[in-house]
Image (spheres, rainbow, N blue to C red):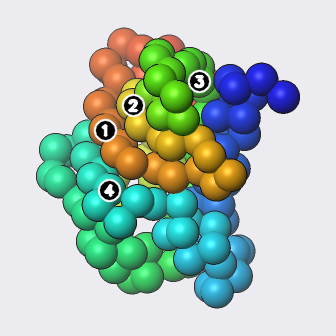
Amino acid sequence: MTTLETVTKEIVGLHDFFAAWFNGTADRDQLHPRFLSRLHPEILFIPPEGQVMNRAILQAGFDRNYGSNPDFRIAIRDVDIRYQHGDRILATYTEWQTGATRSALANNARITTVLMEMTKTVTWLHIQETWLPEAVRSAGPFNF
């Protein structure tokens, strides 16, 4: 498997878990092994709205919102490795959401930059999301 295939599998797998979590179809005992265990203790996540979230804030939000969005779906597109140095990989991807009740738009799209450490386990070190422009979002398919 190529590095790009490994990174893509990690990103898609994690987002599939997010959709299942918010749909309420994932087992509640899977939050740590499927998500939190992948996060560096000092991770920073910056969603498109710009607030800075650490691991504790992310965990509280996930705990609070389990099963809160039964129609939520995610599609990952355009995964690309931007830079690699040793075990560290900087990648970008677009994340398309439909049925998102916690976002300003139920159908939305964002570009994400992630810094990951790829060893025996994958560790997410930093995540930054930015809304895709309206022209891109409105042209993108949401039939997934």
Q: Nearer the viewer, residue 119 or 76?
A: 119
Give the position of the N terminus as an image quadrant.
top right
Residue 43 shows which numbered tag? 4
Q: Spatial distance from mark 4 to mark 2, Cα to Cα?
A: 13 Å
Q: Mark 3 points at which residue?
A: 79
Q: Helix, strand or loop at disc 3?
A: strand
Residue 113 shows which numbered tag? 2
Q: Spatial distance from mark 1 to mark 2, Cα to Cα?
A: 5 Å
Identify residue type, mark 3. Answer: Val
Q: Name the residue under label 1.
A: 128
Tell me the crowding category of disc 4: few under 14, some 14 to 19, or many 20 or more residues within 10 angstroms, Cα based. some
Residue 17 occupies quadrant:
bottom right
Q: Spatial distance from mark 2 to mark 3, Cα to Cα?
A: 10 Å
Please report contact status of discs 1 and 2: CB closer than 8 Å, yes or no. yes
Between disc 4 and disc 2, the foreground one is 4
Q: Which residue is drawn at 27% across and 71% down?
A: 57
Image coordinates for residue 53, horizontal then vertical, percent? 23, 60
Q: First in sequence: mark 3 or mark 1?
A: 3
Identify residue type, mark 2. Answer: Thr
Identify residue type, mark 1. Answer: Gln
